[in-house]
Image (cartoon, grey):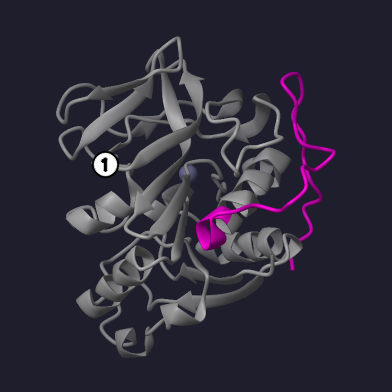
Amino acid sequence: MKNKTLIIDGQNNHDWQRMTPILRQILTHAGCSVDVATTPPKGAAAGWDSFRPDFAQYDVVVSNYLGEDWPMAIIDAMEQWVSQGGGHVAVHAGGTSFAKRKSYNKLVGLAWRESNQGDRITLDADAKVVRIASGQGPGSGHGPCFSYPVNHHQPEHPILKGLPPIWMHSKDELWHGLRGPAENFTVLASAFSPRTGAREPLLWTVNYGKGRSFVTALGHLWNDGETSAVDCIGFRDTLARGCQWAASGTVDLPVPGDFPTEGSTSIGEPVYL
Ligand code: ZN
């Protein structure tokens, strides 16, 4: 499927200028066309007038943006477009903006927030979803970066179908204590956090009106140039498949032969367009 994709960037606490070409490569490799809309930099008084993404031109919007609120008309337009059947994907910190905006929190389901900014979702030892009330337990955080196994929980979901049910992710942050309304929400994958002693959701979907939202908490990019998390074939392939699903509700990408397994990580060629 040749989905028309719009990456949004311009502000982030990660190096978004290095991340966008990485995302472009992953999505182009998966057959998507990719445009980029860049906001003004943080604190810029001018420039917002020319940030006018035309969402209707695209099948899916991919957020590599963490920063100031957009003008109300733009975020309204994006949410409206998704609710009418558009696709939305947030990568790592890309779902963290608009903390006070109810509708955006619904769109991303869970996000990096304080403990009192929404419910927490974990999975118990039987992979049953547990909901913990806002204010109870930790807010969002992560321990030291490491390589860890990712468990899938919806093996028949189009994003996961055919992939190994457990695979070894290359060194990355493992986020915990994410918070949000988590409505119309499906946990696709989790990992056990030694920091919290709980299984933490890392990939999930949200049905948002007639539209679809996919969020991956994976994909940290280090400022010193290390790219192990984004070079992981597991990160790349679940992201590409998540974009296809958000765009269309289906996935036709083949399972790569070098997908990581339960026993070993798999790093792809770090060749960026
Ligand atoms: Zn990070």
Position in image of residue 73 (x %, y %): 23, 79
Q: Secondary structure at mark 1?
A: loop
Position in image of residue 220 (x %, y %): 54, 44
Q: Which residues are magenta?
A: 245-273
Give the residue at mark 1.
113
Residue at 54%, 76% in the rendered image: 36
Q: Is residue 161 left or right of residue 136?
A: right
Q: Is residue 151 left or right of residue 99?
A: right
Magenta stretch secondary structure, dominant: loop
Residue 170 in the image: above or below residue 99:
above
Number of other residues with Cα within 10 Å of mark 1, as a class: few under 14, some 14 to 19, many 20 or more:
many
What residue occupies the far top of the structure in this picture?
125
Q: Quadrant of residue 162?
A: top right
Q: Quadrant of residue 98?
A: bottom left
Residue 43 in the image: above or below residue 50:
above
In the rendered structure, which amino acid carries the disc numbered 1? Arg
Position in image of residue 157 (x %, y %): 56, 38
